[in-house]
Image (cartoon, rainbow, N blue to C red):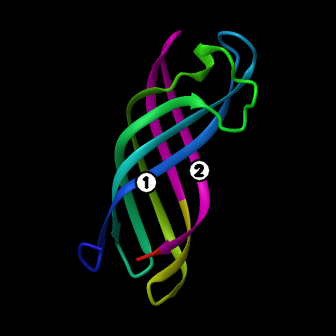
Amino acid sequence: MVTKRMSVILLGGASSTYDYNGIGRPRKRGFEGLFVATQFWTSDRLWLMGRIGATADAPVFFDLEVDNEDEQNYYWDPGLIIGTGYELWRKKKFALDIQSKLHYGYANVLEGKKTGLAFNVGIGFNWY
């Protein structure tokens, strides 16, 4: 926490999967990333968040048949995330919240520039 209403997250992640039917066999790929973020509480329980960093188009960790070199590549390019959340429960330095995030990024893959947009809703367990 930088102030009572603002925090900085030095390293945060994002991950979604999608069906890929490009080079080789049909498979899953990851739309992922690593980001720095700032989070601002507009009220006692409602917060807004912005992240900027690197988006990756990458093989999913659970694909055990990745043997083609093209399938193993990670493609890193810029990305950003905006989001909001509402704290449902808080005790001392811990909180449980419901949150939504919109992740935008692109990657220059073998076929050219691939743009991704993912909307996620989740439950967060936070330690301040």
The kind of secondary structure element at disc 2 is strand
Q: Position of residue 33 (x, y in %)?
A: 46, 41
Q: Quadrant of the N terminus?
A: bottom left
Say if 68 sits above or below 59 in the image. above
Q: Amino acid at mark 2?
A: Asn
Give the residues drawn in magenta, as a range: 100-126
The residue carrying pointer 2 sits among few (fewer than 14), some (14 to 19) or many (20 or more) residues within 10 Å by Cα, namely few
Residue type pointed to by label 1 = Gly
Q: Nearer the viewer, mark 1 or mark 2?
A: 1
Note whether 84 is above or below 45 in the view shown.
Answer: above
Q: Nearer the viewer, residue 54 or 105?
A: 54
Name the residue beneath numbered marker 1.
Answer: 12
How far apart marks 1 and 2 lie (CA) works out to: 15 Å
Residue 95 location (% of width, % of height) = 51, 79
In the picture shown, does residue 15 fall above or below 100?
A: above
Q: Is residue 118 magenta?
A: yes
Please identify the quadrant where the C terminus is shown.
bottom left
Left or right of 5? Residue 55 is right
**Nearer to me, 49 or 16:** 16
- According to the image, label 2 marks what residue? 120
Q: Residue at x 50, y 26 (%)?
A: 74
**In x, y percent, where is residue 108?**
44, 18
Query: In front: 38, or 127?
Result: 127
Residue found at x 39% / y 62%: 48
